[in-house]
Image: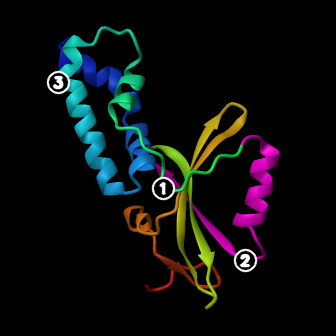
Amino acid sequence: MSNSDEFTRLTDPFRPELPVHCYRMLGSIHDAEDLARETYLRAWRAYENFEGRSSLRRLLRDDVALEMPPNATWFTGRATVGRFIAAKVFAGPGVTRMVRVTANGQPAAAVYRRTDDGVHRAHAVQVLSITDTGISRIISFNDPGLFRAFGLPVTLDAAGVPASA
């Protein structure tokens, strides 16, 4: 097996998560895709010198410059997360509509928020990390521009039906 084939085999499992990691730092889907490609290219070029002292996942993630996401918020524990979601996400009847999507192979929800005119407008894409015990992480990308990348409309009418933008 060539180094290139071995590199591909070993890094393929990380392909869905690296662009998400990059997006968390950059806040732009297009910049994240570019950074993920550049990271894979640098890793591929340096792979022959990889000694295996750390995991490839760590190598790929560490190669990306570390910055904080645009809106850093951290909650620990189901009760704390539940209170936040109840107060901010589901703030009242009909305020929020969610559409199930998949983001880089992970379950996610496209969130629409009702505005004063009664129209639900694109708000955020929330990507879920699932473990055997349930949801372990929710990353919220508060960028309505992402909805087009998922093939979703930017508005829904009061019944939750895609409205013309």
Q: Earlier in the sequence, mark 3 or mark 2?
A: 3
Q: Amino acid at mark 3?
A: Arg
| Magenta segment includes 97 | yes
Q: Earlier in the sequence, mark 2 or mark 1?
A: 1
Which of the labelled discs sits on residue 94, or is there none? 2
Question: Residue at label 3?
Answer: 45
Residue 144 vs 155, above or below: the answer is above
Question: Residue at label 1?
Answer: 70
Residue 102 vs 89, above or below: the answer is above
Q: Residue 101, image x and y in percent? A: 52, 56
Separation (CA) of disc 2 from disc 1: 27 Å
Q: Amino acid at mark 1?
A: Pro
Camera-nearest residue between 105 and 50 = 50
Residue 138 vs 99, above or below: the answer is above
Q: Residue 148, image x and y in percent? A: 39, 68
| Magenta segment includes 89 | yes
Dot 3: element? helix
Q: Residue furthest bottom?
A: 117
Q: Which residues are magenta?
A: 76-104
Picture quadrant of residue 46: top left
Q: Earlier in the sequence, mark 3 or mark 1?
A: 3
Depth check, mark 3 against mark 1: the one in front is 1
Q: Amino acid at mark 2?
A: Gly
Crowd tier of the residue under label 2, counting other residues whose Cα lies within 10 Å: few below 14, some 14–19, many 20 or above: some
Q: Is residue 145 left or right of residue 102?
A: left
Depth check, mark 2 against mark 1: the one in front is 1
